[in-house]
């Protein structure tokens, strides 16, 4: 177990793994809100009884336990953090209902597109699909009434979409190293590239952002799970 000193906020525990992009989302949200929590490192090959009891449906990380009550799924947890500590700055969700709907849409877009898991031709197709999706986000930063001209998807402060995509950044950088590819090209995606650099240097993010080099082992193990042939019966 590791303790994260991030201010005072009751009894908060986070079950996760240090190299998990979805866990990183929650850690960013907690850090931005200045919430003190206990981080419990899970062995995903030998999951703790606490994890299995706290998330009996999916048995996955992350799980936030607040005053003994578990909350599951990374972006649901981020919304919970915003609502449970709504008096703490910054606001992670827009106050305007329309802007809030737009934030949820783009966070869902990030989640729906997944990550690279293939090899060979399959890997190349996954790279091409990922680049196409990042170009969509570049266009959103350029033209969306909610995002255009702002430093973050959340406006002047880091918000819901920034956290959804920001949790993936160390993973994306490591994927570029692992696949010898460029997913976020500074020439083709100048706004997204600038956003990425800005977010990674922001207070509350840089403190919890893992080194992409440390993500490589996690990525190779992750990809192996999805590309290995099924065991013979």
Image (cartoon, rainbow, N blue to C red):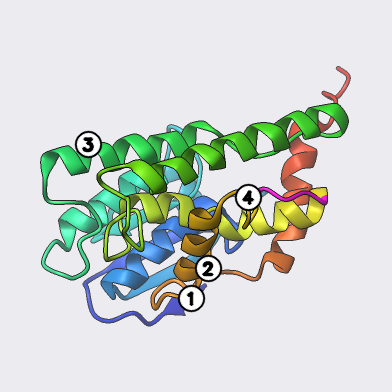
Q: Which residue is mark 4?
A: 44
Splitting the image into 4 quarters, where does residue 4 fall? Answer: bottom left
| Mark in front: 3 vs 2 | 2
Q: Is residue 146 above or below residue 14?
A: above
Where's the C terminus, which quadrant?
A: top right
- Apparent side of residue 96 relative to residue 46 in the rendered image (left or right): left
**Disc 1 to disc 4, how far (Cα)?**
30 Å
Q: Is residue 112 above or below residue 45?
A: above
Q: Which residue is mark 2?
A: 197
Q: Position of residue 140 (x, y in %)?
A: 40, 42
Upstream in the sequence, badge 3 or badge 2? 3
Which residue is depicted at the point 46% across and 69% down?
198
Q: Counting other residues with Cα less than 10 Å from the Cα at mark 4, is it few (<14), some (14-19), or many (20 or more)?
A: few
Upstream in the sequence, badge 4 or badge 2? 4
Q: Do labels 2 and 1 touch, CB within 8 Å? A: yes
Q: Position of residue 27 (x, y in %)?
A: 42, 64
**Disc 3 to disc 2, how far (Cα)?**
26 Å
Upstream in the sequence, badge 1 or badge 3? 3
Q: Secondary structure at mark 2?
A: helix
Magenta stretch: give its range. Answer: 180-184
Q: Position of residue 50 (x, y in %)?
A: 45, 53
- Apparent side of residue 58 relative to residue 146 in the rendered image (left or right): right
Q: Which mark is residue 201?
A: 1
Q: Which residue is mark 3?
A: 101
């Amino acid at each position: 177990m590791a303790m994260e000193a991030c201010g005072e906020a009751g009894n908060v525990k986070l079950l996760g793994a240090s190299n998990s992009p979805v866990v990183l989302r929650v850690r960013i949200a907690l850090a931005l809100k200045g919430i003190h929590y206990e981080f419990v490192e899970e062995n995903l090959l030998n999951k703790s009884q606490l994890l299995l009891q706290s998330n009996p449906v999916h048995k996955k990380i992350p799980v936030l336990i607040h005053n003994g009550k578990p909350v599951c799924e990374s972006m649901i947890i981020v919304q919970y953090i915003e609502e449970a500590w709504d008096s703490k700055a910054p606001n992670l969700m827009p106050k305007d209902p329309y802007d809030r709907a737009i934030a949820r849409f783009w966070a869902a877009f990030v989640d729906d597109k997944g990550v690279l898991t293939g090899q060979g031709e399959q890997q190349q197709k996954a790279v091409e699909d990922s680049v196409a999706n990042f170009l969509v986000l570049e266009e959103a930063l350029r033209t969306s009434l909610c995002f255009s001209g702002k430093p973050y998807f959340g406006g002047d402060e880091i918000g819901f979409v920034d956290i959804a995509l920001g949790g993936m950044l160390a993973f994306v950088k490591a994927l570029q190293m692992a696949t010898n590819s460029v997913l976020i090209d500074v020439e083709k995606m100048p706004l997204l590239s600038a956003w990425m650099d800005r977010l990674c240097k922001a207070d509350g993010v840089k403190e919890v952002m893992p080194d992409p080099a440390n993500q490589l082992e996690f990525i190779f193990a992750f990809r192996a799970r999805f590309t290995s042939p099924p065991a013979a019966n």
